[in-house]
Amino acid sequence: MKRIPLSLLAVALFCLAAAPIDDPCTCAAARKANGWCDRCEIGYVASIEVRSSILFEALDAHGHEIDPESASLQSCPGCVVALKNDGYCPQTRCGFVGKLAYFSRLTYLLAKGERTDLSRITCTVCTANAADTTLPVHGRGWCDECKVGLIGNVAFRDPKMFKAAAKEYERLLKAIKTSERCGTCGAAQFYGRRCPICRISYTTGEPVKMKPVRSAPP
Ligand SMILES: [Zn+2]
Ligand SMILES: [Zn+2]
Ligand SMILES: [Zn+2]
Ligand SMILES: [Zn+2]
C-alpha cells in the first residue's frame, strides 16, 4: 500500500473541517417550504425566522405520512373523522390535511392555507400585510380588496380560519421570543408543557405563576 504524502492528508483534513462553511445557503428554499438552512442556522415557519433549532424541531411544521389503519389512529374516533375531512382533533391535538398529519393547531392551519409567492403580490395592502408579520396578532392583516388574510407567506381566504390561525400564530411569536433565552422553554410555551432545564411550566402560552415556596419553620 502506498503511503499518502502528509501534505495531501493535511489538505484533505482541511477540506473536511471546512466543509460546513461551504454548505450553500438554502434560506430561499427553506423560507418557502418550512425548512432549515444549515449555513445560516435559521429555520422558517410560514416564512417567519426561527433561530432556535430546538424550537424549530419541536414545531415540526411539515406534514407526516400516517398509516390510516394504525392502532393509534383508529383508537381515537376524532382522529378517524378528522383524517377523512381534513379536520382537527382537539383530543390528540392532531390535524390532517391531504392525508398528512400535523401535530399542532398552528401547523395544521398553516397547511390548510395557501403558500404564496410574496414577490408576486401586486396589491399594496397585501404587500404591507405580508411585510409586517405582527399584524395578524393585532387582528389585522386582512385585505378587503383581495379578500385574503396573510400570515407570513400563507394566505387564508376564509376569515374565520385566518382568525384562528392568527391566534395560534401569536403563540408562535411568543415562543420565538422565549427561545432567544431557552429553546426548550420556547417549545414548552408553545405546547403548554414544562421546561425541564429551567423548571418553568407553561399553560396557554404563558408561564405558570408559582406560589413562592415558604421555607419550613425551624
Ligand atoms: Zn441561509
Ligand atoms: Zn384524535
Ligand atoms: Zn390585497
Ligand atoms: Zn428553559
Image: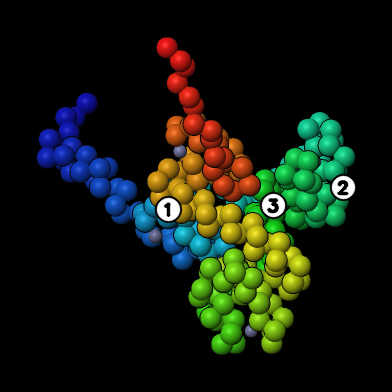
Badge number at residue 192 = none
Q: Residue at x 70, y 67 (%)?
A: 162
Q: Nearer the viewer, residue 182 or 58?
A: 182
N-terminal label among 3 and 1:
1
Q: Residue at x 46, y 54 (%)?
A: 177
Whether pointer 1 and pointer 2 mark residues with C-beta atoms closer than 8 Å, the reply is: no
In the rendered image, the vertical position of residue 53 relative to residue 147, given as above or below: above
Kindly state the secondary structure of the residue where label 1 is placed.
Answer: loop
The type of residue carrying mark 3 is Arg
Q: On the image, numbered disc 1 is attached to which residue?
A: 51
Whether pointer 3 and pointer 2 mark residues with C-beta atoms closer than 8 Å, the reply is: no
In this image, 143 relative to 54: left or right? right
Q: Residue at x 48, y 53 (%)?
A: 176
Query: How far, Cα to Cα, is label 3 from label 2?
Result: 16 Å
Image location (x, y in percent) of residue 90:
77, 45
Which is in the foreground here, disc 3 or disc 2? 3
Badge number at residue 81 = 2
N-terminal label among 3 and 2:
2
Q: On the image, numbered disc 3 is attached to which residue?
A: 105
Query: How far, Cα to Cα, is label 1 from label 2?
Result: 36 Å
Kindly state the secondary structure of the residue where label 3 is placed.
Answer: helix
Location of residue 197 (image quadrant):
top left
The type of residue carrying mark 2 is Val
Give the quadrant of the N terminus. Answer: top left
The type of residue carrying mark 1 is Arg
In the rendered image, the vertical position of residue 112 relative to residue 52, given as above or below: below
Label 3 CA crowd tier, 10 Å (few <14, some 14–19, many 20+): many
Asked if residue 187 shows in the view, the reply is no
Q: Quadrant of ligand 1?
A: bottom left
Colour scheme shown:
rainbow
